[in-house]
Amino acid sequence: MSNLATAELFDVFNARRVKVPELRGLDLMVNGLKGWVKNRLPSLARYRDLAMRVEQLEPQIRDLGSARFGEQVEQVRQQARLGRMEGEVLDRGLALARQACWRSLGKRPYPVQIMGAGAMFDGVIAEMATGEGKTIIAAMVAALHAFAGRPVHVITVNDYLVARDAQEMEPLYKMLGHSCGHVVHDCPAEVRYHEYRKNVVYVTSKELVADFLRDQIRLGHVRSGAEQMIQVLERGPMRNGVLVPGLWRVVVDEADSLLIDEAVTPLIISNSPDDNPNSELYSLAAQLAAMLVEGRDFTVDRTVRNVDLTGRGQRRLDELADQMQQQLDDSKSSFFAGVRRREELVQQALVARHCFLRDEHYLIDREGKIQIIDESTGRVMADRTWRHGLHQAIEIKEGVTVTADKENLARQSFQRFFRQYPDMSGMTGTAWESAAELWQIYQRPVVRIPTNKPCIRKQLPARMFDTAEQKWEAVITRVIELHDRGVPVLVGTRSVGASEEVSRRLFKAGRHHRVLNAAQNAQEATIIAEAGLPGRITVATNMAGRGTDIKLGQGVVELGGLHVIATEPHASHRVDRQLFGRAARQGDPGCAQMFASSEDDLFVRYAPRLRRAWRTIGFERLRKLAQAKAERFARFNRRQVLKSDEWMDQALPF
């Protein structure tokens, strides 16, 4: 076996055994204070100085011929391999990367992009406004990291962007002497094996974590590089080799979405039996749930999506079960014999009936399967299922084919996974609100990079209504008014159902429009890219289309630019800011406005008693109170998962 292969085997296990220390008591307080200070240090001045030094190097770098340019790149590579990528070496590396962007892509990064790249190379989460060219920044940072000789992972939000960014940035990497690969959902294992061994790999978080877990299953009882080396000698590298050769450096696009919103999402590798012997039990549970009365037999907490049986409800359930048992054969007696399991299945059926809505939390695809919708992005979470019988309860509720119970083989939250990287950085348009949490969980500070051109977005006052019907009428009236003037409009909604409601009303009004929701995920980039054309009406769920540039059509600047309408506030103010950031990019004009009603989900769930008094309280105060409560609840969930992750770090050897 070659020395390189041997080193890789040990590197794999070393990278898989990175542990994040658990802090308690005074240590936790000191760490929090340290994060507070780091997030408020005047670090922008340092990155401005870095950008100025890179600017000063540009004349001599620009005049280099191809051969001399390659020699300078090789010198930086050698210094990086020795761990000396700092000071003058870093300045020259950035200057070479900037010149490579110009020579290979025809784009010259702005000083603020150099600032962002410098911050991210330091392991910082950079907040950069929408449209500031974060794709090129990520490529520059990945190229600098790749000089050290370890694989660099660039994480983005979907397979389309993975393939697009890898293809567009490949000339830059080639000019700097790097190989660039990408992994998407339909890549076979042999292709993945070789793609992961390239210098820079573009991949979604889901595919990367899934491959990491498959490696975990493949390794089985193997717990050291020596054991793995013996297996490779016996069986060959591809039969028992791992796909992901260690976790070293990662650059995360849309970092707030992945590291915060999706942090607690567990990715699970499971197997499915060919049949489902429990489908009839889920059906029986749904029948019993339909006979119970809310308020008398059970209570519903829609904030946490939980159902509790009352004492009377438990007695009523026992009575109904006894009556049903007498009418059924003995083959289903196990369902009635186990009281606790029966109550759990009935509670899941009640949760499915009362807490999960079609076209908001899930949809039914063309094949008749339940597909979960990511509430933060509006995208379909393909191949995901709810656990503990909830998915089957929803399938029974919707009358579709009930899938089999799955046996979990391996699982890991995104939060735990990304904490294993020794070197992580990220970028997003909205991170400041979560700065404290990003430090607490990932030990990463946040820096706000200024825009290249001043933002001239016009933020109109929010409009609040008593009922959803009044709100929808006002939204449609405003869209028609803007459309008559030829102004492009982007209408943002929280759910598929809301987007279809807007679409129905626009169709009734005779207005041509395009809809982008979880049901049209494949067309997402094209629809969003054309949202700035004159007279275009685009209806989109939340942040569908993140990562796609919206360019204004001819004459749109004179009309005031793109007009963004939010049809209700999100549970996180960050997502509202992301939506409004669609307008007025790169110094273009634009306008944004919020429409809301007291019947919106945010207020129903998190301000049920105050929502009717919005005229007294005021919309802004009500929104802040409700969003603060929603974010506290989300942080609590993430803390609970963090505790579980820390326990797993201590208890498990991988």
Image (spheres, grey):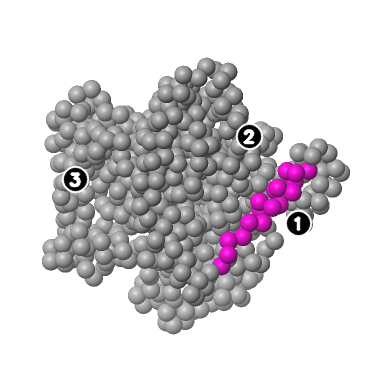
Q: Is residue 398 above or below residue 139?
A: below
Q: Is residue 489 visible?
A: no
How far from the left and from the top, in percent, is residue 213? 64, 51
The three-letter code of the residue at mark 2 reads Gln
Foreground mark, 1 or 2, reads 2
Residue at x 15%, y 41% (from the top left corner): 478
Q: CA distance from mark 1 to mark 3?
A: 56 Å
Report the side of 290 relative to 342 (left or right).
left
Residues at discs 2 and 3 in contact (Cβ within 8 Å): no
Foreground mark, 2 or 3, reads 2
Of mark 1 and mark 2, the one earlier in the sequence is: 2
Which of the labelled discs sits on residue 459, or is there none? 3
The three-letter code of the residue at mark 1 reads Arg
Residue at x 86%, y 44% (from the top left corner): 234
How far from the left and from the top, in percent, is residue 127? 37, 47
Q: CA distance from mark 1 to mark 2?
A: 33 Å
Quarter that holds the C terminus = bottom right
Residue at x 66%, y 53% (from the top left corner): 16
The three-letter code of the residue at mark 3 reads Gln
Q: What residue sits right under mark 2 in the picture?
A: 78
Q: Is residue 439 above or below residue 301?
A: above
**Mark 2 residue crowding within 10 angstroms, few (<14) / some (14–19) / many (20+):** some
Q: Determine which quarter of the picture holds residue 82.
A: top right
> Which residues are the magenta region?
6-22
Q: CA distance from mark 2 to mark 3?
A: 50 Å
Residue at x 79%, y 39% (from the top left corner): 3
Which of the labelled discs sits on residue 223, or is there none? 1
Residue 21 included in the magenta stretch of the image: yes
How far from the left and from the top, in percent, is residue 461? 15, 50
